[in-house]
Image: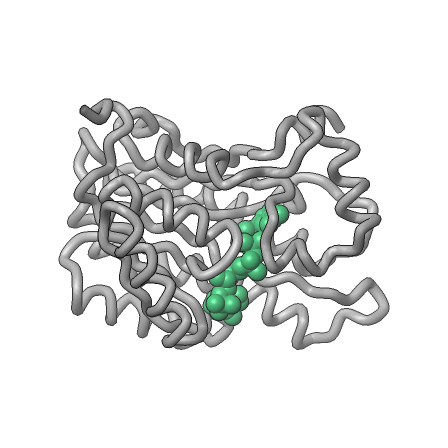
Amino acid sequence: MPDPLFSIDGKVALVTGGTSGIGQMIARGLVRRGVKTYITGRDAETTGALAETFSTEEKGTCLGMAADLSRADEPERLAAELAGREERLHILVNNAGAGEAASLPDVSVKDWDTVMDVNLKAPFFLVQKLLPLLKKASSAEDPARIINIGSIGGLHIPNWDAFPYGASKAAIHHLTRALTKRLGDSHITVNAIAPGPFPSRLTDTSSDAVKQSVRTYIPLGRAGEPEDIEGLVVFLSARAGAFVNGCTIPLDGGYIAAL
Ligand SMILES: NC(=O)c1ccc[n+]([C@@H]2O[C@H](COP(=O)([O-])OP(=O)(O)OC[C@H]3O[C@@H](n4cnc5c(N)ncnc54)[C@H](OP(=O)(O)O)[C@@H]3O)[C@@H](O)[C@H]2O)c1
């Protein structure tokens, strides 16, 4: 018998960027707990195939939707597509993210725009366009939940260049607080998770020096694992997390605390 304090069975969730890394960890964890979970990725075929795998292997249903969130028109189109399929959205996880490989002298305007569009602009407009569905899922006893995936990169200045990325993540943490103030009346909680290093495509491109230096400074001496992010998202989405609102929670083994 599942503990009702942590039960999320029967809810509906959207996880952007559910095809890889942290988003995939979150999506699988939600599907495992009986949440009807929509995942997005840029390629319809691979997104659909992964959703089918989750549906087969886990308890709940997973469905794929294609979206390129670097495009300004995509949040509205994605929200309309979801509204065509669902009346309510209980959990929105703004996870899709992009980083830039270039250092200060080489950052291009295109790098800047892509990072800001995917990491900051799309989450805001997804919230705006999905508000009607979130409001229909919300009540004083069981608020709808918005979870923005930020980064420790938005909480400190690393020893390597990550200019648009760090700025986009600091901004999504700020946006989280601003939305918290505005959406409380609608019984919608808004929180951000600021992960430390987790294995993903994004971090695979980091140099060994960066990976090593990050791990050296984590008091727990390891990178994040699927259960770490899954556990926090389940907590924030369940009754147990219903009064947590407006927080940016570092999920980093103590990295930020120990700086
Ligand atoms: N991994 C870490 O150590 C770490 C640490 C702190 C914060 N984060 C944050 O965690 C989130 C997930 O990152 P990750 O590390 O798991 O990276 P990842 O493995 O590269 O996954 C990124 C996800 O975002 C999607 N995505 C990328 N560009 C997109 C675009 N233009 N339109 C739509 N979707 C797009 C990808 O989907 P497709 O490629 O299928 O389109 C993929 O599902 C990001 O917000 C990242 O900043 C990660």
Q: Is residue 120 visible?
A: no
Question: Residue at coordinates 47% horizontally, 54% vertically from top-left?
Answer: 95
Question: Residue at coordinates 52% horizontally, 36% vertically from top-left?
Answer: 248
Farthest residue, direction front: 57
Left of 217 or right of it: where is 246?
left
Q: Nearer the viewer, residue 250 or 60?
A: 60
Quarter of image, ligand 1: bottom right
Q: Position of residue 113 (x, y in %)?
A: 61, 71
Quadrant housing residue 196: top right
Question: Residue at coordinates 16% horizontally, 60% vertically from top-left?
Answer: 86
Q: Nearer the viewer, residue 42 or 167?
A: 42
When the figure is inspected, residue 217 is found, relative to residue 25, above or below; the finding is above
Q: Is residue 78 visible?
A: yes
Q: Position of residue 103 (x, y in %)?
A: 81, 63
Q: Nearer the viewer, residue 139 or 46?
A: 46
Which quadrant is the N terminus positioned in? top left
Quadrant housing residue 151: top right
Left of 27 or right of it: where is 206?
right
Color style of the picture: one colour
Q: Position of residue 259 (x, y in %)?
A: 76, 28
Left of 73 or right of it: where is 216?
right
Left of 13 or right of it: where is 43?
right
Q: Position of residue 241 (x, y in %)?
A: 34, 28
Quadrant housing residue 7: top left
